[in-house]
Amino acid sequence: MSWRNHAKPAARQGRRHAAGPSARKRMVVVVGLLGLVSIGLVARAFDLQVVRKQFYQRQGDARFLREVPIPVSRGTIFDRNGEPLAVSTPMMSIWANPSVVLDNDERIPQLAQALGVDADGLKAQLVQRADREFVYLRRQMAPAAAQAVLDLDIPGINGQREFKRYYPSGDVTAHVLGFTNIDDRGQEGLELAYDDWLAGKPGAKRVIRDRMGHVVEDVEQVRAPKPGQNLTLSIDRRIQFLAYSELKNTLEKSQADSGSMVILDVKTGEVLAMVNLPTYNPNAVNGSKPEQRRNRSMTDVFEPGSTVKPILLAAALSSGKYTPTSPIIDTTGGHWFFQGHDIHDTHNWGLLTPTGVITKSSNVGAAHIAMQLDTSLMYDTYRAFGFGNSTNSGFPGEAAGYLQVGVKWRPLEKAILGYGYGLNVTVLQLANAYATIADGGVMHSPTFIKGGDNDAKTIIDPQIARELVGMLETTTQPGGTAAPYAWIANYTVAGKTGTAHKATAGGYSKNNYGAAFAGMVPATNPRLVAAVVVDNPRKGSYYGGLVSGPIFAKVMAGALRLLDIPPDNIGRWYVGGPLQSPDGLTGSKPPVAVNIEEAPEDVTP
């Protein structure tokens, strides 16, 4: 063998060693790379599962997990006898995920027909809000109608349970109750005043929704729902309806602009009825006007006219200068020209006792009494009876009225304040003042809640209060301004009429009047007080006795029967007028019945 043959194997062996690393080395490299990759994966998994778990959990939840409200029913409002005045009924609202619905826009006409809307308008609404995930399409549908929409199974369409307020008594109790908005929150009246009590607290839960918006799974309850609490009012629905019916009848006959009536429980200050006309239907608020929704008994003020004279007499009796029968007041001629102003009566009543001033409603007599009283005493008495102050009833928007500070009274202002001009009061304030007289001089803060705690304080001496009731009783007896219009069979009635010119720009109107009557029954042991005001009666009479007196009599007769208050005047008939002094200084002729359509057209406020 030549040397060439021996050299070739060696060369081939050298070339094999120079060709690259061995299989073992390659294996080590591969395993190393795999190990590094595994470590990277483990590190990444650790980062995702541990370090940034919360971040990715939130991202996932944001796509599928939702917190949705759990609606609660608003508390029911009852009258004092347990009759429902405001209830919540379950409804269903239809909402959409616009982008999902638009992806299936061929079904929009079908959806629009089910909702009762225009298809083009619906599509435009969805396009305008395409960047949102939740848009209401129709609120508070009847459950059956809403279910018919959901049964169409249109992608992106869902339902949400809600509640809607319903008022069984409609416009009869509208001003007291007020109403709620579409989100079931109180907007006016007691619905607003007690909104937190009635509304409750909606709950919340987390759910998983699919991409169509349907709830796939309830995950957890976040907050337990707390239903609203019920509220029992002092209002008696039966008496409320009586007051509403009689006031409505009178306004229609007299063609008056408006009217109000308030009835109070003398012993507690509870409001048994509060009615205003015009009114509105709280079940269809959108069709009403602001003036219809105004609770005139609480927000509107008026000059009370002669209905304020008992308050003047309260100051007079408290002064010690006057008693019910003395001194004698000379109203001869029926006119008193005082500081360039003609204070006048409807008739020449001649000589009157203080009781006669009430019986005949003499402006001249009242002005004379006012000028004999200390200004501070008269002002403090008016103020103590609540004039110029809120009654603290808690009703939203209650007016305080107006009474000028006594130190600013000029002589003429003081004189006309004696017969009810120069101050403004609400119907509730007037009723509460009479309730104070009826309850022996004790004033209660009016309340709309049955059995509610309300403040009570003594305003005048009980003996003076009893004397005032006796004086007011003569108004409804023969010869009085409210006889026989405010009579109630088998019951004694004490009250006072008021007929006042309405203030206008630059003075007082000669043809527009406010006709008022305030009184209490039974006079021997008063249980109920009512104040009635009819604004600007145009047809027939405009006297308070002839217009508002009959409303008082009819409503209170029904209320006395409903509340089972026993009569105090069975078999007692008055013959002739009340004897107000040993000499009988007021007329004793029985009144001549005057038809409301034939009443005289002249009046002195």
Image (tube, grey):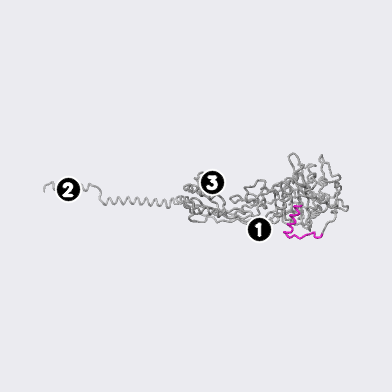
Vertical position of residue 423 compared to residue 564: above or below: above
Which quarter of the image is occupied by the C terminus?
Answer: top right
Residue 33: give x, y in percent of width and height: 32, 50
- Secondary structure category for the residue under label 1: loop
Q: Residue at x 38, y 52 (%)?
A: 42
Report the mark closest to the observer, 1 or 2.
1
Q: Which residues are magenta?
A: 550-571
Q: Is residue 553 within the magenta segment?
A: yes
Answer few, some or many: residues within 10 Å of disc 3's Cα (few below 14, many 20 plus, some between 14 and 19): few
Q: CA distance from mark 3 to mark 2?
A: 96 Å
Kindly identify which residue carries mark 2.
10
- Secondary structure category for the residue under label 3: loop
Q: Disc 3 residue type?
A: Asp
Kindly identify which residue carries mark 3.
118
Kindly identify which residue carries mark 1.
83
Q: Are marks 1 and 2 in contact (CB under 8 Å)?
A: no
Q: Disc 2 residue type?
A: Ala
Q: Disc 1 residue type?
A: Glu
Q: CA distance from mark 1 to mark 2?
A: 118 Å
Q: Earlier in the sequence, mark 1 or mark 2?
A: 2
Q: Earlier in the sequence, mark 3 or mark 2?
A: 2
Frontmost residue, 555 versus 29: 555
Q: Earlier in the sequence, mark 1 or mark 3?
A: 1
Give residue 190's mark. Answer: none
Frontmost residue, 17 versus 560: 560
Frontmost residue, 367 versus 291: 291
Vertical position of residue 451 compared to residue 510: above or below: below
Residue 132: give x, y in percent of width and height: 50, 46
